[in-house]
Structure formats: C-alpha cells, structure tokens
C-alpha cells in the first residue's frame, strides 16, 4: 500500500522501498569495484583496492591528512590505517611530511604517482557516468546531481552520528545500540 506524502514531508512508502532496492543494486555494482580495478591496472598494478580507499579519504579530508584522520574517514582501526599508508609510502603513491601544526605528527601527501592514480580513477568514473546519463536531458542531470549529493551527505551524516553514539556507548562500558 502506497502512503502519500504527509504534511511533515515524509516520503511515500513505495518511494522509500524503491530507493532501498536501488541502493542494493548500486551496492552490488560498486562492490565489484570496476572503476578502481581499471585505474589500478592502468597506473599502479601493485596496489590493492583498499589502497584506493585511502586515496579517496585523503581527498576528502579537510586540513592535514594524518593516519588518524584517514582511519577515521575510512571507519577503520588506526593500526590498519597505518599499515595501508605504510604500504602506499613504500609503493611510491604517498609520502610523509612533518606536520606544521604538531611536529610529532606526520602529514600524508600524494606523490605524483598518487595524483596520477586519482586522475585516472576520476576519468574512468566520469566516463562511466557520462555514458549512463548520455540520453538524459541536461536539466535532469543537474537535478539528479543536486538530489544525489544531498542524499549521500545526509546518509553519511546519519551513519556517522550512529557510529559516534555506538562508540560512545562502548567507551563507557555499555552495550552498543
């Protein structure tokens, strides 16, 4: 049964179910990591898919990219983040600099190779997206871009808030919600 929008702006049940099914399909498609695999094969065949995530995290961090900030962006343990960064430094994709804010910390930067890998991934991704929307009117593409960005930002904020609550509960010795 489809429920119409309420006065408070709640979406219909049918629309929510359609979004949920579409997210599941997209997760499977993205889970194959085709874009990342192509970029790695073209630029740095020795890297793994988890290394691509580090590059993306560095790109999204406001301020200094430290191992801790990268681990937080990826929602992984700092020791795992440290190992990933060390692998990438050894592979010539990243390098470490002394932090200008705190000399005890290292700032992680992309090397020329890292920049090239990010560009290759962006080019492949842009090409795939262009093909997917090739027959859409320009206005639809612009509306979709705005709505999709808003949805993903809100989705990320909800997940981040829930993760913080769970971590806060665990750190106080209680069960995670």
Image (tube, rainbow, N blue to C red):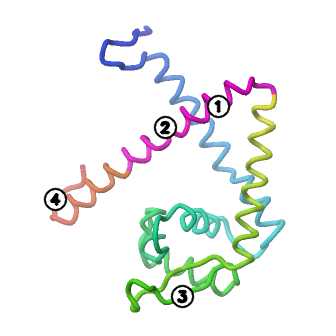
* Element on which disc 1 rests: helix
Disc 2 versus disc 3: distance between alpha carbons?
Answer: 34 Å
129 or 24, nearer to the observer: 129
Dot 4 or dot 3, earlier in sequence: 3
Which residue is identified by label 4? 174
Disc 4 versus disc 3: distance between alpha carbons?
Answer: 39 Å
Which residue is identified by label 3? 97
x, y percent for residue 126: 75, 47
Q: Is residue 43 above or below residue 136?
A: below
Dot 4 or dot 1, earlier in sequence: 1
Q: Quadrant of residue 169?
A: bottom left
User: Residue 150 colored magenta?
Assistant: yes
At label 3, counting other C-alpha atoms closer than 10 Å, the crowd grade (few under 14, some 14-19, many 20 or more) is few
Disc 2 versus disc 4: distance between alpha carbons?
Answer: 33 Å
Which residue is identified by label 1? 142
* Element on which disc 2 rests: helix
Dot 2 or dot 4, earlier in sequence: 2
Q: Is residue 16 above or below residue 177?
A: above
Which residue is identified by label 2? 150
Disc nearest the viewer among 4 and 1:
1
x, y percent for residue 133: 75, 32
x, y percent for residue 28: 63, 43
User: Residue 98 colored magenta?
Assistant: no
Name the residue rendered at 81%, 70% in the picture: 43
């Amino acid at each position: 049964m489809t429920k119409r929008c309420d006065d408070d702006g709640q979406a219909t049940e049918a629309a929510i179910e359609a979004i949920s099914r579409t997210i599941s399909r997209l997760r499977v498609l993205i889970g194959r990591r085709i874009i990342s695999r192509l970029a790695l094969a073209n630029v740095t065949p020795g890297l793994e898919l988890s290394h691509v995530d580090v590059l993306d995290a560095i790109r999204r961090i406001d301020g200094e990219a430290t191992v801790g900030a990268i681990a937080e962006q990826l929602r992984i343990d700092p020791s795992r983040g440290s190992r990933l960064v060390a692998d990438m430094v050894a592979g010539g994709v990243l390098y470490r600099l002394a932090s200008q804010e705190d000399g005890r910390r290292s700032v992680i930067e992309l090397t020329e190779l890292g920049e090239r890998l990010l560009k290759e991934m962006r080019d492949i991704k842009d090409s795939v997206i262009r093909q997917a929307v090739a027959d859409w009117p320009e206005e639809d593409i612009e509306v979709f871009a705005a709505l999709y960005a808003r949805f993903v930002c809100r989705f990320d904020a909800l997940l981040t808030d829930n993760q913080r609550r769970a971590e806060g509960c665990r750190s106080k010795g209680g069960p995670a919600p």
